[in-house]
Amino acid sequence: MSDRKTGLKWGADEILAFLERDFPQVFRNGQSYAIERLEPKGVSVRLIAGEAQLRPGGTVSGPTMMELVDLAMYMMLLARHGDAARLCVTTNFSISFLRKPPPGDIVVDLELIKHGRALSVGDARVHAAGREMLVAHGECTYHMVSDSATQSR
Amino acid sequence: MSDRKTGLKWGADEILAFLERDFPQVFRNGQSYAIERLEPKGVSVRLIAGEAQLRPGGTVSGPTMMELVDLAMYMMLLARHGDAARLCVTTNFSISFLRKPPPGDIVVDLELIKHGRALSVGDARVHAAGREMLVAHGECTYHMVSDSATQSR
Amino acid sequence: MSDRKTGLKWGADEILAFLERDFPQVFRNGQSYAIERLEPKGVSVRLIAGEAQLRPGGTVSGPTMMELVDLAMYMMLLARHGDAARLCVTTNFSISFLRKPPPGDIVVDLELIKHGRALSVGDARVHAAGREMLVAHGECTYHMVSDSATQSR
Amino acid sequence: MSDRKTGLKWGADEILAFLERDFPQVFRNGQSYAIERLEPKGVSVRLIAGEAQLRPGGTVSGPTMMELVDLAMYMMLLARHGDAARLCVTTNFSISFLRKPPPGDIVVDLELIKHGRALSVGDARVHAAGREMLVAHGECTYHMVSDSATQSR
């Protein structure tokens, strides 16, 4: 079911339902995710961290932010392609950690800066909920083709 | 206690004991890690995956490989610096996913290609245990200074 | 001479004069650069391409865009630190090429997303002059310390 | 003309002749390149630097190393695909600068770590000629498809 206004195939509820059904391990470590904004060229995802995502001091770990960025890009492509995005795989991923985040929830604002037939690229800015200062900046490239030789979802 | 032969401050047991004591969340999701090789310029770490690290089909997920690469670099610096490496933080991290890994354990061979006073860089090659074919290739830069403004461990 | 209003040590003229005097090779291949915007947290630099920067069809080559991004980050740090930025070196650089640029000038909008004592990070968006669509997206990390073991300017 | 022994479509001479004919700007700034090794999974390319590639002190500049890495990957694909590699474009490029290179020629050893139908990835190690110590480490992803929406050669 596509949304006429936005051109998106799936909304936040459909994306989360798909992940819960097909990728339950995304939630298995105690974290949960809220899609706070979903537009044709961007998505904002909040990580509600569980204990497994925190370092001493209550701040979110680096690998947890990496997973959040990668997941936000996957959600963006699920919104655009619906079930067909099942075939997407991450090909290149880079992130720079800028500052130790304050304790609390983390939000990623992902912008879809390329959406080609084969390759899509997302620019990701990670900040603490309610604060503008970036804690990390990442970029994620996905390959849209069902190429069994490529990885990784 | 430094090893005279290798110039390493800590061996595999000390590294794992430190992580279990100070970063128990590294093991909290059911995975465990075996240090298979530890040399002054390189370390090989095997991920013994639990269910939370697997995708449908029994293969290891992308974020799990990211975490493995980042952890191998941290282990390398713990080996070189012992407790002083507590102050290390990841500053830049990049990874390319090359192929879907076969089901089973995953090993990262990390080579320390720069070990400066301020910055250290590791080149990481990820493959399935017992197989040479790379499934991912990453690079990880750590900052060695106690700069509270920087992230992330 | 520092500008009271902006907190910048150098303006566009001083930056270009420094480069012409100390890094003339930046201009040696026939290109020139115009600083179109200079603020405490960002700079926009236009490349006026010469023949050596073009591919068949009149579009700017990939390596030329890489050089432009790296140079924009250096200009940003020259603006902030003046002559002291002479000691800066690029440590990590990444770029994704999104679309073939149209023929003509290229502009990079660089945002300083971290400005630490040791490390600074710039987020760079490259587009054709007068057009919004991104042709490339890059990130550049500079190390601010006079560490002779590090590279590269 | 394909080489039976190596499975390569083109040898070093054919690659250089193609570049001189179709990409003369690669040599326009006074540099030249020697292909020192060409195998199915790897290539070594030496940059014989001209003045335009040097920084004060006679060392090769960062952007020159970036261009060398990107060019080595293109040469690798020209060797594998011959004229069909004309359609290749760089999609993702990352490099870390590890040490200031000594004055003199620079060599990149590029290894083709993925060679898929759509995407190829090269791992690049840059060192001074005759010396093992790395000065830079890069990675380059090329897209093999004639997708006019993608960049950049």
Image (cartoon, coloured by chain):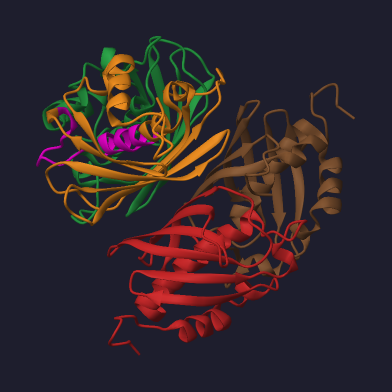
Chain colours: A red, B brown, C orange, D green
Where's residue A83, x and y in %? 41, 80
Magenta span contains residue D122: no
**For residue C68: magenta?**
yes
Q: What span is in magenta?
A: C52-73
In the displayed structure, B32 sits above or below A24; it is above
Q: Residue furthest front?
A: C4
The quadrant in which residue B74 appears is top right
Residue C59: x, y in percent?
Answer: 15, 42
Toward the viewer: D96 or A38?
Answer: A38
Q: Residue C104's x, y, as percent?
A: 12, 42
Viewed as shown, does residue D108 lie left or right of A69? left
Q: Is residue C69 visible?
A: yes
Instruction: Residue C106: name its quadrant.
Output: top left
Q: Is residue A95 above or below residue B81?
A: below
Quarter of the N terminus of chain A within the rendering: bottom left
Q: Residue furthest left?
A: C57
Q: Is residue C137 left or right of residue A133?
A: left
